[in-house]
Amino acid sequence: MKFFVDTADTDAIRELTELGMVDGVTTNPSLIMKAGRDIKEVTKEICGITDGPVSAETVATDAEGMIAEGRELAKIADNIAVKVPLTWAGLKACNVLTNEGRMVNVTLCFSGNQALLAAKAGATFISPFIGRLDDLNLDGMELIADIREIYDNYGFETQILAASIRSANHMSDAAKIGADVATAPPDVIKKMAQHVLTDKGLEGFLKDWASTGQSIL
Ligand code: G3P
């Protein structure tokens, strides 16, 4: 499973990229607002940090507007994936931008039917939002499984990009189901390394090692 980092914080992207953990980046209007920077400037910097796809989201609500914004965002760098919402207009824009040879990420997906339409429209990525379904006491992970089944039934090449990931368990569950990509905030990716027994075990080893009085270097 590929890891995308879901942030416009360039320091955090840089840190994870240096560890070899980042296969791409996703941003959205809320993340750009949080970064407090100009969208083109920050997106260009991100595209220089990673070679992987960098999703940059359109904000128009009509297809023509999304297409124009998508073309503009795509000028920033070759690794831009234009992000459009899963509306009828977004699907139309997806189809046009895909036919122009651009990567397109269709976002705000909450059903198998929406994912099916995005694949038919030629999306490079479909972004089902796990956490926001869980917030409503629905099962976000079930949606990932449904889309995996639907795409596998027909050999759709659209990549399932599990999004709205809130916990380390979301990451492993998405990986078990076979999501192609998971995009997560930097702190969630870091939390994947944590285990109380690792900490406890290390503490014991270090205590015993100190009592030997030895040093390795
Ligand atoms: O990847 C989409 C993500 O940014 C939305 O996450 O936590 O706001 O639902 P969240």
Image (cartoon, grey):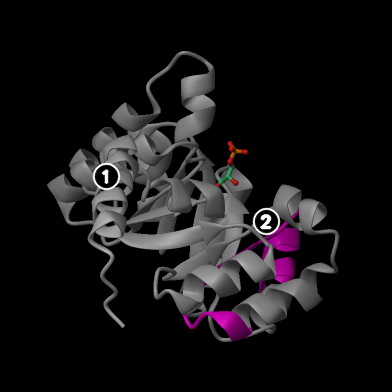
The residue tagged 2 is 63
SS at mark 1 in the image: helix
The segment highlighted magenta reads 48-70
- Of residues 212 and 204, which is closer to you in this image? 212
Residue at horizontal 58 percent and vertical 74 percent from the top: 14
Q: Is residue 35 magenta?
A: no
| Amino acid residing under circle 2 | Ala
| Amino acid residing under circle 1 | Gly
Residue 160, percent across and down? 34, 52
The residue tagged 1 is 204
Q: Nearer the viewer, mark 2 or mark 1?
A: 1
104 on left or right of 126: right
151 on left or right of 81: left
Q: Residues within 10 Å of mark 1 (few under 14, many from 20)?
A: few
Q: Exactly how many numbered labels are in the figure?
A: 2
- Of residues 20 and 34, which is closer to you in this image? 20
Residue 124, percent across and down? 41, 64
Residue at horizontal 26 percent and vertical 70 percent from the top: 214
Whether residue 128 can be seen here: yes
Q: Is residue 54 magenta?
A: yes
Q: Quadrant where the N terminus lies? A: bottom left
